[in-house]
Amino acid sequence: MSKPITAIVLAAALAVSLVTLVAAIRLPGSNQGYEPVQPIAYSHKLHAGDLQIQCMYCHSAADKSRHAGIPAMNVCMNCHSGVTASMTAVRQEEEAAKKENRAAQTIESAELRKLYDALALDETLFPISDKTATPIAWKRIHNLPDFVYFDHRAHITASVTCQTCHGPIETMERVRQYERLSMGWCVNCHRDANENGIAGKQVKAPLDCVTCHY
Amino acid sequence: MPDTPKRYWLSVVERDTPEEVSRSLENGDPEFAPTRRSFLKAAGFTFGALAASSCRAPDVDAIPYVQQPDGLVPGRPLFYATTCGACEARCGLLVTTRDGRPIKIEGNPDHPFSGGSACAVGQASILGLYDSLRLQYPTKAGQRVAWADADKEILATLDRMKQEGRAVRVLTSTVTSPTTAAVIADFLSGFANGRHVSYDPISSAAILEAHAQTHGARLLPQYHFDQADVIVSFDADFLGAWISPLQHARGYASRRRASETSPTKSYHVQIESRLSLTGSNADRRLRVAPGEVGHVATHLAAKIAQRAGASFAAAGLTPSSFDAAIEAIAERLWNARTRGLVVSGSQDVQIQTVCNFINQTIGAYGVTVDLSRPSFQRSGSDTQLAELRAELARGEVGALIIAGVNPVFDLPDAATLSNDIKRVPLVVSTAERADETASLAHFVCPDHHYLEAWSDAEPVSGLVSLAQPTIRPMHETRAFIETLAAWAGKPQPALELIRAHWTMAVHPRAEGGLPFTVFWDRTLERGVAEVGPRPGAGAAPSFNAAAATPVLQPGGTSADGLTLVLYSKIGMLDGRHGHNAWLHEMPDPVTKVTWDNYASLSPETARRLGVEDGDVVRVTADGSSALELAAFVQPGQHDSVVSIALGYGRAGTDRFGRVGPPWFEARPRLEPVGVNAAVWITSTENARQYAGRAVTVTSAGRRRPLASTQVHHSLEPPGSTERRPIIQEVTLAELTAPPAAAPAEAEHPAGHVEGDLWPDDHPLEGHRWGMSIDLNSCTGCSACIVACQAENNVPVVGQDEVRRNREMHWLRIDRYYSGTDDELEVAHQPMLCQHCEHAPCETVCPVLATTHSEEGLNEQAYNRCVGTRYCANNCPYKVRRFNWFDYPHEDRLQNLVFNPNVVVRSRGVMEKCSFCVQRIQENKIEAKRLGQPLADGAIKTACEQTCPAQAIVFGDLHDPNSRVTALAASRRAYRVLEELNTQPSVRYLKLVRHERPAAAAGGEGRNG
């Protein structure tokens, strides 16, 4: 075997291992673009974008606590005990029923059925007596490392919009991590806020290590 | 020269040969020195571990509630007012829960005992909840059994006993719960020969018996230390482990604060044979032999009687060698009259009657000694216990139900007792674990941990409190009252039992005429209610002076001259918390020893016997087996005394051999922690005796080094005899002297540096956090150490690592001695990160992991630290702690106790006190959210929050109206090692002494 071939093979192997290494190493916090499949295909575009439901209707702790909170299933049921399918599907059924001259049936979307199953509800949305409700295990997207303490409350108080960190969430069919959420990214925003204020208000965004690390 | 001449020292070795200590700390124990081979092994392991670790972020689930409970906000804590079950004092607690699990115990601010504080034991008891060695289900002969089956079999046997008319006995410790008492009475009423026997593992029966003799009522008075100007304590460790330590400590501390504006302080005399925590706080301490205590008390009584013109039958009283001292004490006590208080921890009824005589003669009853609202915290009867033991020995008992006590561990002659218990046809224990006694029982029906259970308490007459569950029971356990109600044939949930009893017996005593449900709801919310005194307890008894029996001559000692004194330690009490790692790792407030009990000897006696700290000695009492313990040299102890702590040597504590890193040089101790000294308890007619037994002590010729922290992290320059003014003090007179006479600001020791290290380009605006610690109030009780540990996820490292100087406590209490053994003075100094303005640690960190915040905090970014340890080397206060290893909980279930607001640090990083920055951030953000200014006192560090003496104050030094700013301007304020110009943010307030001791007044030659 000639030397150039060995060299090429070695170089290729090196390149492959380097690429694999770079691809494999994903430091905590640098999950930009992370977009996992969720157990229920919940659409932020539909709820927050088209229907314009306020973010804090569901993430109700965002202005009171460090955590914004993922809504408990009873929050979903505030609407979805009545709304069991998309408006389009309901209209289609109504029109079909009118055409066929029969009473319209209740339409239930396949995704919402997953919610009802988790809550152990039958077709008429009554509890199934011998089943217990099990919470839905969503995939967490915005997950800062354990040594970072981010507080939603402080940012809402300072009039930072949700989109500043989470991106145009109202356009996302499936949520992905929009920003880098790295320390440099946080600090740049804090510096910028100190210089230019937020929404015309002057703010004091601390730059101490113990702002986030303790 | 008021401040500098006194020399303080940490241990006898450090006093006499300081170079020895620094050498041992520099090189470590030679046994522990690593070899080249072991170093290579460790290095290889490290690189292997590095290579094996990966850094891919995993997918994480986020699981919301199905139905979110009302009022719960994710990430915010919920607080429950409840009652402490860690000892019989029954203080009020406020338990912090996060996501349904309790994570921290604090005192209930509305409870008169605690006022927001909690003691070390109470706070640490949360760890017991998450102990996976607790019994998780009922057992029969060690095998799992269903509750229904156990109930059925037990009921059948009880029925048989009833028909045969055999004795049924319920054995408990003092029952402070009115409902429990009623349920026990109801259960026993079904039997012709049923009786409830209660005893206290650490008995105070002599006080009750003495009041039966002198006042005609078997009562334990409530002591009001907050009313006392002069306190005379005969061997009562009332700040440590005696009856109701938190209540005593708060009351005591309220009379110990002295400031320029109110230069008064109570006068505390401690007459004792060993150096207790209480004795370490005394203004005057008499070191007497155990046999002399009664004699000294009688002399005091005679002198008081003489002043009062009362008759005291003390003819034939032999003279005392302490006459002059007693005369001075009598004078002070007589001047204080009703504001005087005499207490005694003695189990000699005779001595207690003499103390009652003194209290009666000075008129203390009704002021400092309260019989109208007596205490129910110790009501056990040693007479009844002796009767029960006799019944057991005769084989008369048909059924024995044991709840809340561990007699085979607590009582002497355990072998006979266990044989007698084994002969009882039905033995049921409700112990939380298969302890020494429960392992003999036919059935073990485990009780809940108190944080899982409904309960109630009436620790003193008229003060009732409720205990509510803070978590759903973790295992298949059942409340003792439910168990007993089931066996009485009336099964009911505990809550119903309590409500029923309160409707009937507690609510009618309440004033204000509230309907029951309102009264109940308010009491549940507040945790405590004050009602009328318990009927039948606390009438105004008459005094019978003739019952006071003087002790005419001092008791003798053995030929060898050594007398045994058994005592209980502030952390371990009677041993019920023997499975609590936090309490084992908490250094004893006086000896600073962790993870062991030991035989304390005075320096003179140790010299005579030729033993040093850590030499194993064999202690033999006539007629009973010998035990071997490590010796400890204790200054201030009487030369004739060997003192040993009770409560050690619990079965199963060899589990703690697993604490600490499993590394190649680990020397875990695979045996129970300490030895059980209860074998030496003796009994007289009506009281168990802990002191007075003659013993011989011989060296066993071995060593077992104690894990003592007393010379760790010393602030003195290594190997030098130079003494720094770390502890400073003033006298009451100097406090009010005109400012000219007070020490001038310029009077700094040699080598003082001044000037500013940093250019003035970082103007510090906004908050400036600072702390003030009053050395005069601090009693050394160590509650702050446990508070800090719980709040900041401080790990337990184990005995082996403590021996290597690697304890991780962010806050330690340095204990300094001064003076001679006879005139010993002690100072306690909490030492934590001083958050220096000119922090020496910050300038040496090569990676900027430790920096200064805009608010004056010295911040430590764990994720940035690479572990060079330069900062710890450069810290003059020695408050930085390095994670040599990951120190996981020995019991993984205990991970549930972690505070989610603080990072759990990993191996290889430096950590230290952060001034509870998580609390600062929380309160700052919350104030901003509510649009309110941050009030002074809104932020409380964990140590400040729990301090029973309220010695610690945290606040904003830039706020001109804050308490900490005012204290910083006090004439007593000083900063430790100020001469180094580190400009600490922590100011200490000087100790205030009544007067300078004669020995120190002239300045001793030893100094400097």
Image (cartoon, coloured by chain):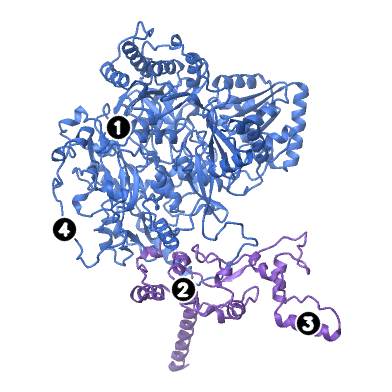
What hue represents chain A? purple
| Nearer to us: label 4 or label 1 | 1
- Residue that badge 3 annotates: A93
Residue at image mark 4 = B755
Q: Residue furthest top?
A: B315
Asked if residue B176 lies left or right of residue B324, the reply is: right
Cβ–Cβ under 8 Å for marks 1 and 3:
no
Image position of B564 with respect to B754: above or below: above
Chain painted blue: B
Dot 3 lies on which element?
Answer: helix
Kind of residue indicated by mark 2: Leu
Report the residue marked by disc 2. A27
Badge 4: few (under 14), some or many (20 or more) residues near its Cα, within 10 Å?
few
Side (left or right) of A58 relative to A200: right
Camera-side mark, 3 or 4: 3
- Amino acid residing under circle 4: Gly
